[in-house]
Amino acid sequence: MSRITLSRFLIEQQRKAGTLPPELRLLIETVGRACKAISYSVNKGALAGILGEAGTGNIQGEAQKKLDVIANDFLLDANEWGGSLAAMASEEMELPYHIPGEYPKGEYLLMFDPLDGSSNIDVNISVGTIFSILRCPEGIDHPTQEAFLQPGTKQVAAGYTVYGPQTMLVLTFGSGVHGFTLDREHGSFVLTHSDMQVPESTQEFAINMSNMRHWEAPVKRYVDEMLAGKTGPLGKDYNMRWVASMVAEVHRIITRGGIFMYPKDARDPDKAGKLRIMYEGNPMAFIIEQAGGAATNGYQRILEIQPQGLHERIAVFLGSKEEVERITRYHQEQ
Ligand code: AHG
Ligand code: MN
Ligand code: MN
Protein backbone atom coordinates (compact mmCIF):
# COMPACT_ATOMS: atom_id res chain seq x y z
CA MET A 1 0.00 0.00 0.00
CA SER A 2 1.24 3.46 -0.84
CA ARG A 3 2.31 5.80 1.89
CA ILE A 4 -0.24 8.04 3.57
CA THR A 5 1.02 11.58 3.80
CA LEU A 6 -0.46 14.12 6.21
CA SER A 7 -2.33 15.79 3.30
CA ARG A 8 -3.87 12.54 2.14
CA PHE A 9 -4.75 11.49 5.67
CA LEU A 10 -6.54 14.78 6.32
CA ILE A 11 -8.42 14.72 3.01
CA GLU A 12 -9.59 11.17 3.70
CA GLN A 13 -10.72 12.20 7.18
CA GLN A 14 -12.61 15.11 5.67
CA ARG A 15 -14.46 12.73 3.36
CA LYS A 16 -15.37 10.42 6.23
CA ALA A 17 -18.72 11.72 7.46
CA GLY A 18 -17.51 15.30 7.38
CA THR A 19 -15.62 14.94 10.67
CA LEU A 20 -12.98 17.43 9.58
CA PRO A 21 -14.13 20.69 7.94
CA PRO A 22 -11.97 21.82 4.97
CA GLU A 23 -10.91 25.06 6.71
CA LEU A 24 -9.63 23.09 9.70
CA ARG A 25 -7.86 20.64 7.43
CA LEU A 26 -6.05 23.51 5.69
CA LEU A 27 -5.13 25.03 9.01
CA ILE A 28 -3.62 21.80 10.35
CA GLU A 29 -1.65 21.37 7.12
CA THR A 30 -0.34 24.91 7.41
CA VAL A 31 0.78 24.39 11.00
CA GLY A 32 2.51 21.20 9.80
CA ARG A 33 4.29 23.20 7.09
CA ALA A 34 5.53 25.74 9.65
CA CYS A 35 6.77 22.88 11.85
CA LYS A 36 8.72 21.53 8.87
CA ALA A 37 10.45 24.89 8.52
CA ILE A 38 11.22 24.92 12.25
CA SER A 39 12.55 21.37 12.01
CA TYR A 40 14.99 22.33 9.24
CA SER A 41 16.25 25.29 11.30
CA VAL A 42 16.61 23.19 14.46
CA ASN A 43 18.60 20.65 12.44
CA LYS A 44 21.02 23.21 11.04
CA GLY A 45 21.80 24.53 14.52
CA ALA A 46 25.07 26.45 14.69
CA LEU A 47 25.41 26.24 10.88
CA ALA A 48 22.47 28.61 10.58
CA GLY A 49 23.47 30.75 13.56
CA ILE A 50 20.21 29.99 15.35
CA LEU A 51 21.59 28.90 18.73
CA GLY A 52 21.91 31.11 21.81
CA GLU A 53 20.04 33.95 23.41
CA ALA A 54 17.87 36.43 21.54
CA GLY A 55 18.67 39.11 24.12
CA THR A 56 14.95 39.76 24.73
CA GLY A 57 12.38 38.59 27.29
CA ASN A 58 8.81 37.36 26.90
CA ILE A 59 5.64 38.16 28.85
CA GLN A 60 6.40 35.23 31.18
CA GLY A 61 9.55 37.04 32.34
CA GLU A 62 11.67 34.36 30.63
CA ALA A 63 14.76 35.12 28.53
CA GLN A 64 14.04 34.27 24.89
CA LYS A 65 16.33 32.08 22.84
CA LYS A 66 16.87 33.00 19.20
CA LEU A 67 14.95 29.90 18.24
CA ASP A 68 11.94 30.88 20.41
CA VAL A 69 11.64 34.01 18.27
CA ILE A 70 12.38 32.29 14.94
CA ALA A 71 9.83 29.52 15.59
CA ASN A 72 7.22 32.09 16.63
CA ASP A 73 7.80 34.04 13.40
CA PHE A 74 7.56 30.90 11.24
CA LEU A 75 4.19 30.05 12.76
CA LEU A 76 2.83 33.59 12.38
CA ASP A 77 4.07 33.95 8.78
CA ALA A 78 2.71 30.58 7.69
CA ASN A 79 -0.71 31.04 9.24
CA GLU A 80 -1.67 34.69 8.77
CA TRP A 81 -2.65 34.59 5.09
CA GLY A 82 -4.51 31.28 4.72
CA GLY A 83 -7.99 32.55 5.57
CA SER A 84 -8.81 29.97 8.29
CA LEU A 85 -7.94 32.08 11.31
CA ALA A 86 -9.62 34.85 13.28
CA ALA A 87 -6.51 35.39 15.46
CA MET A 88 -3.48 33.68 17.03
CA ALA A 89 -1.97 33.67 20.50
CA SER A 90 1.50 32.55 21.53
CA GLU A 91 3.48 31.91 24.69
CA GLU A 92 5.98 34.41 23.28
CA MET A 93 3.52 37.31 22.75
CA GLU A 94 1.69 39.29 25.39
CA LEU A 95 -1.44 39.93 23.32
CA PRO A 96 -3.36 38.08 20.59
CA TYR A 97 -2.01 38.51 17.06
CA HIS A 98 -4.58 39.90 14.68
CA ILE A 99 -4.81 38.84 11.05
CA PRO A 100 -3.49 41.70 8.90
CA GLY A 101 -6.25 43.61 7.07
CA GLU A 102 -5.17 42.50 3.57
CA TYR A 103 -6.01 38.84 4.33
CA PRO A 104 -9.40 37.17 4.76
CA LYS A 105 -10.38 36.05 8.25
CA GLY A 106 -11.71 32.63 9.22
CA GLU A 107 -13.49 31.03 12.14
CA TYR A 108 -10.64 29.47 14.13
CA LEU A 109 -8.25 30.58 16.86
CA LEU A 110 -4.74 29.13 16.93
CA MET A 111 -2.58 29.02 20.07
CA PHE A 112 0.99 27.78 20.27
CA ASP A 113 4.11 27.24 22.29
CA PRO A 114 6.44 27.74 19.30
CA LEU A 115 9.47 26.16 20.94
CA ASP A 116 8.97 23.97 23.95
CA GLY A 117 11.99 22.92 25.99
CA SER A 118 14.06 25.83 24.77
CA SER A 119 16.69 25.29 27.51
CA ASN A 120 17.62 22.17 25.51
CA ILE A 121 18.27 23.74 22.13
CA ASP A 122 21.89 24.75 22.76
CA VAL A 123 22.77 21.29 24.12
CA ASN A 124 21.32 19.36 21.16
CA ILE A 125 18.48 17.65 23.05
CA SER A 126 14.92 17.28 21.73
CA VAL A 127 12.67 20.33 21.62
CA GLY A 128 9.17 20.73 20.17
CA THR A 129 6.20 22.85 19.11
CA ILE A 130 2.75 22.54 20.73
CA PHE A 131 -0.50 23.87 19.23
CA SER A 132 -4.17 24.08 20.09
CA ILE A 133 -7.14 25.13 17.92
CA LEU A 134 -10.45 26.59 19.13
CA ARG A 135 -13.44 28.00 17.30
CA CYS A 136 -13.79 31.76 17.60
CA PRO A 137 -17.05 32.63 19.42
CA GLU A 138 -19.72 33.88 17.02
CA GLY A 139 -20.08 37.58 16.32
CA ILE A 140 -16.55 38.50 17.35
CA ASP A 141 -14.76 40.34 14.60
CA HIS A 142 -11.67 41.43 16.47
CA PRO A 143 -10.87 38.68 19.00
CA THR A 144 -9.32 39.88 22.27
CA GLN A 145 -8.00 37.54 24.94
CA GLU A 146 -11.56 36.77 26.17
CA ALA A 147 -12.33 34.94 22.92
CA PHE A 148 -9.49 32.51 23.70
CA LEU A 149 -10.53 31.83 27.30
CA GLN A 150 -12.45 28.62 26.62
CA PRO A 151 -12.03 25.36 28.53
CA GLY A 152 -9.92 22.69 26.82
CA THR A 153 -12.99 20.56 26.07
CA LYS A 154 -13.75 23.13 23.35
CA GLN A 155 -10.56 22.41 21.41
CA VAL A 156 -11.29 21.17 17.89
CA ALA A 157 -7.72 19.99 17.32
CA ALA A 158 -4.36 19.91 19.07
CA GLY A 159 -0.94 18.53 18.35
CA TYR A 160 2.75 18.70 18.88
CA THR A 161 5.85 18.26 16.76
CA VAL A 162 8.88 16.76 18.43
CA TYR A 163 12.25 17.68 16.88
CA GLY A 164 14.22 14.65 18.02
CA PRO A 165 16.27 11.98 16.25
CA GLN A 166 13.19 11.96 14.02
CA THR A 167 10.82 14.87 13.57
CA MET A 168 7.30 13.65 14.37
CA LEU A 169 3.95 15.41 14.25
CA VAL A 170 1.36 13.93 16.63
CA LEU A 171 -2.17 15.11 16.20
CA THR A 172 -5.75 14.78 17.39
CA PHE A 173 -9.01 16.29 16.25
CA GLY A 174 -11.07 14.25 18.67
CA SER A 175 -11.01 10.82 17.06
CA GLY A 176 -7.82 9.22 18.36
CA VAL A 177 -4.20 10.23 18.07
CA HIS A 178 -2.26 9.99 14.82
CA GLY A 179 1.54 10.15 14.48
CA PHE A 180 3.45 11.24 11.33
CA THR A 181 7.19 11.08 10.73
CA LEU A 182 8.89 13.72 8.58
CA ASP A 183 10.45 12.20 5.47
CA ARG A 184 13.13 14.76 4.68
CA GLU A 185 13.82 13.48 1.15
CA HIS A 186 10.18 13.93 0.15
CA GLY A 187 9.53 16.91 2.42
CA SER A 188 6.33 15.40 3.77
CA PHE A 189 4.93 14.01 7.00
CA VAL A 190 4.03 10.32 6.58
CA LEU A 191 1.59 8.39 8.78
CA THR A 192 3.71 5.97 10.79
CA HIS A 193 1.82 5.62 14.09
CA SER A 194 -1.93 4.96 13.85
CA ASP A 195 -4.21 5.14 16.88
CA MET A 196 -1.52 5.81 19.48
CA GLN A 197 -2.42 4.54 22.97
CA VAL A 198 -0.92 5.30 26.38
CA PRO A 199 -0.50 2.05 28.35
CA GLU A 200 -2.81 2.13 31.42
CA SER A 201 -0.20 1.33 34.02
CA THR A 202 3.46 2.23 34.19
CA GLN A 203 6.66 2.05 36.20
CA GLU A 204 8.19 5.27 34.92
CA PHE A 205 7.80 8.82 36.20
CA ALA A 206 9.04 12.26 35.17
CA ILE A 207 9.40 15.16 37.58
CA ASN A 208 12.09 17.75 38.28
CA MET A 209 13.33 16.24 41.57
CA SER A 210 15.46 19.29 42.37
CA ASN A 211 12.27 21.07 43.43
CA MET A 212 11.32 18.38 45.97
CA ARG A 213 11.72 20.68 48.98
CA HIS A 214 9.11 23.05 47.47
CA TRP A 215 6.42 20.44 46.71
CA GLU A 216 3.09 20.07 48.46
CA ALA A 217 2.34 17.04 50.68
CA PRO A 218 0.46 14.85 48.12
CA VAL A 219 3.30 15.04 45.59
CA LYS A 220 5.93 14.31 48.27
CA ARG A 221 3.91 11.31 49.45
CA TYR A 222 3.48 9.91 45.94
CA VAL A 223 7.13 10.32 44.91
CA ASP A 224 8.29 8.82 48.25
CA GLU A 225 6.07 5.83 47.62
CA MET A 226 7.47 5.37 44.11
CA LEU A 227 11.04 5.66 45.40
CA ALA A 228 10.30 2.99 48.04
CA GLY A 229 10.07 0.48 45.17
CA LYS A 230 8.94 -3.12 45.34
CA THR A 231 8.81 -3.36 49.12
CA GLY A 232 6.95 0.01 49.44
CA PRO A 233 3.18 0.61 49.31
CA LEU A 234 3.05 0.61 45.48
CA GLY A 235 4.77 -2.78 45.26
CA LYS A 236 6.91 -2.09 42.20
CA ASP A 237 10.25 -0.55 41.27
CA TYR A 238 10.04 2.67 39.25
CA ASN A 239 12.39 4.26 36.76
CA MET A 240 12.79 8.04 36.36
CA ARG A 241 13.32 10.31 33.33
CA TRP A 242 13.45 14.11 33.06
CA VAL A 243 14.21 15.60 29.64
CA ALA A 244 12.99 19.13 30.53
CA SER A 245 11.12 19.30 27.21
CA MET A 246 7.46 18.56 27.87
CA VAL A 247 6.98 17.53 24.24
CA ALA A 248 9.66 14.86 24.54
CA GLU A 249 8.23 13.59 27.85
CA VAL A 250 4.70 13.37 26.42
CA HIS A 251 6.00 11.62 23.34
CA ARG A 252 7.79 9.05 25.49
CA ILE A 253 4.64 8.55 27.59
CA ILE A 254 2.42 8.13 24.56
CA THR A 255 4.88 5.57 23.21
CA ARG A 256 5.62 3.44 26.27
CA GLY A 257 3.61 4.85 29.20
CA GLY A 258 4.61 6.90 32.22
CA ILE A 259 3.49 9.84 34.30
CA PHE A 260 4.64 13.45 33.83
CA MET A 261 4.31 15.90 36.70
CA TYR A 262 4.92 19.61 36.97
CA PRO A 263 3.22 20.40 40.29
CA LYS A 264 2.49 23.69 41.94
CA ASP A 265 5.36 24.44 44.29
CA ALA A 266 6.30 26.96 46.94
CA ARG A 267 8.92 28.82 44.88
CA ASP A 268 6.40 31.39 43.71
CA PRO A 269 3.18 31.10 45.73
CA ASP A 270 1.33 33.32 43.24
CA LYS A 271 1.76 30.79 40.46
CA ALA A 272 -0.33 27.64 40.27
CA GLY A 273 2.49 25.82 38.45
CA LYS A 274 5.08 26.42 35.72
CA LEU A 275 3.27 25.26 32.62
CA ARG A 276 0.70 27.31 30.76
CA ILE A 277 -2.84 26.05 30.38
CA MET A 278 -3.46 27.47 26.89
CA TYR A 279 -0.21 26.42 25.18
CA GLU A 280 0.87 23.34 27.14
CA GLY A 281 -1.80 22.02 29.55
CA ASN A 282 -4.86 21.95 27.28
CA PRO A 283 -3.33 20.63 24.04
CA MET A 284 -1.34 17.93 25.84
CA ALA A 285 -4.36 16.95 27.98
CA PHE A 286 -6.50 16.61 24.82
CA ILE A 287 -3.89 14.41 23.14
CA ILE A 288 -3.27 12.26 26.23
CA GLU A 289 -7.00 11.72 26.85
CA GLN A 290 -7.55 10.85 23.20
CA ALA A 291 -4.79 8.26 23.57
CA GLY A 292 -6.56 6.69 26.57
CA GLY A 293 -4.55 8.43 29.31
CA ALA A 294 -5.58 11.06 31.86
CA ALA A 295 -4.58 14.64 32.70
CA THR A 296 -5.45 16.62 35.85
CA ASN A 297 -4.17 19.56 37.85
CA GLY A 298 -4.30 17.34 40.96
CA TYR A 299 -7.97 18.06 41.59
CA GLN A 300 -9.86 18.08 38.30
CA ARG A 301 -9.56 17.29 34.60
CA ILE A 302 -7.37 19.93 32.98
CA LEU A 303 -9.78 20.08 30.05
CA GLU A 304 -12.65 21.23 32.29
CA ILE A 305 -10.83 24.18 33.86
CA GLN A 306 -12.14 27.60 32.84
CA PRO A 307 -9.00 29.61 31.99
CA GLN A 308 -8.80 33.11 33.48
CA GLY A 309 -5.88 34.50 31.47
CA LEU A 310 -4.05 33.86 28.21
CA HIS A 311 -0.79 33.12 30.04
CA GLU A 312 -2.27 31.45 33.11
CA ARG A 313 -0.23 28.66 34.67
CA ILE A 314 -1.45 25.37 36.13
CA ALA A 315 -0.14 22.23 37.79
CA VAL A 316 0.04 19.29 35.37
CA PHE A 317 -0.18 15.54 36.06
CA LEU A 318 -0.62 13.50 32.91
CA GLY A 319 -0.02 10.08 31.43
CA SER A 320 -0.98 6.52 32.30
CA LYS A 321 -4.45 6.47 33.83
CA GLU A 322 -3.79 4.42 36.97
CA GLU A 323 -0.97 6.70 38.12
CA VAL A 324 -2.73 9.97 37.29
CA GLU A 325 -5.79 8.73 39.19
CA ARG A 326 -3.59 7.90 42.19
CA ILE A 327 -1.90 11.32 42.46
CA THR A 328 -5.28 13.02 41.91
CA ARG A 329 -6.74 10.94 44.75
CA TYR A 330 -3.84 11.93 47.02
CA HIS A 331 -4.63 15.62 46.37
CA GLN A 332 -8.34 15.17 46.94
CA GLU A 333 -7.82 13.17 50.16
CA GLN A 334 -5.57 15.65 51.94
P1 AHG B 1 9.33 26.38 27.48
O1 AHG B 1 10.67 26.03 26.90
O2 AHG B 1 8.25 26.49 26.43
O3 AHG B 1 9.36 27.55 28.41
O4 AHG B 1 8.81 25.13 28.33
C1 AHG B 1 9.67 24.49 29.22
C2 AHG B 1 8.84 23.69 30.18
C3 AHG B 1 8.59 22.26 29.78
O5 AHG B 1 8.84 21.92 28.46
C4 AHG B 1 9.49 21.45 30.67
O6 AHG B 1 8.82 20.29 31.05
C5 AHG B 1 9.75 22.36 31.84
O7 AHG B 1 9.53 23.65 31.41
C6 AHG B 1 11.18 22.22 32.33
O8 AHG B 1 11.24 22.87 33.53
P2 AHG B 1 12.58 22.86 34.46
O9 AHG B 1 13.48 23.89 33.87
O10 AHG B 1 12.05 23.22 35.82
O11 AHG B 1 13.18 21.49 34.42
MN1 MN C 1 6.81 24.97 26.79
MN1 MN D 1 8.25 27.76 24.69
Image: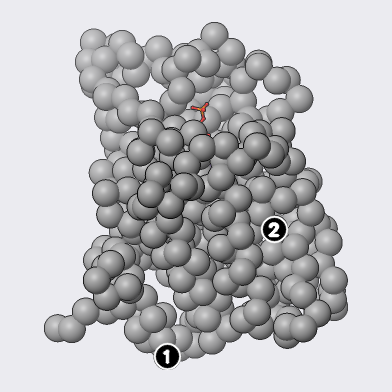
Cα distance in 3D space between marks 2 and 1: 30 Å
Q: Nearer the viewer, residue 44 or 308?
A: 44
Name which residue lies at 63% across and 30% down.
Answer: 273
Q: Is residue 291 above or below residue 240?
A: below
- Residue 135: x, y in percent? 68, 71
Identify the mark at residue 267; answer none if there is no mark: none
Callout 2–callout 1 Cβ contact below 8 Å: no
Residue 301 in view, yes or no:
no
Horizontally, residue 67 falls left or right of residue 196, namely right
Residue that mark 1 sits on: 15
Relative to 147, residue 140 above or below: below
Quadrant that contains the N terminus:
bottom left
Q: Is residue 52 left or right of residue 200?
A: right
**Position of residue 194 in the picture relative to residue 144 (left or right):** left
**Position above or below: 282 against 225:** below
As shown in the figure, which amino acid type bears the numbered disc 1?
Arg
- Of the residues under marks 2 and 1, which one precedes in the sequence? 1
Report the residue marked by disc 2.
89
The percent position of residue 4, horizontal first and vertical second, equals 27, 79
Dot 2 falls on a residue whose secondary structure is strand
Q: Nearer the viewer, residue 297 or 192?
A: 192
The vertical placement of 333 against 42, above or below, is: above
Residue 175 place in picture, x, y as percent: 43, 69
Q: Residue at x 70, y 38 (%)?
A: 57
Q: Identify which residue is drawn at 26% across, 68% down.
A: 183
Q: Amino acid at mark 2?
A: Ala
Q: Residues within 10 Å of mark 1 (few under 14, many from 20)?
A: few
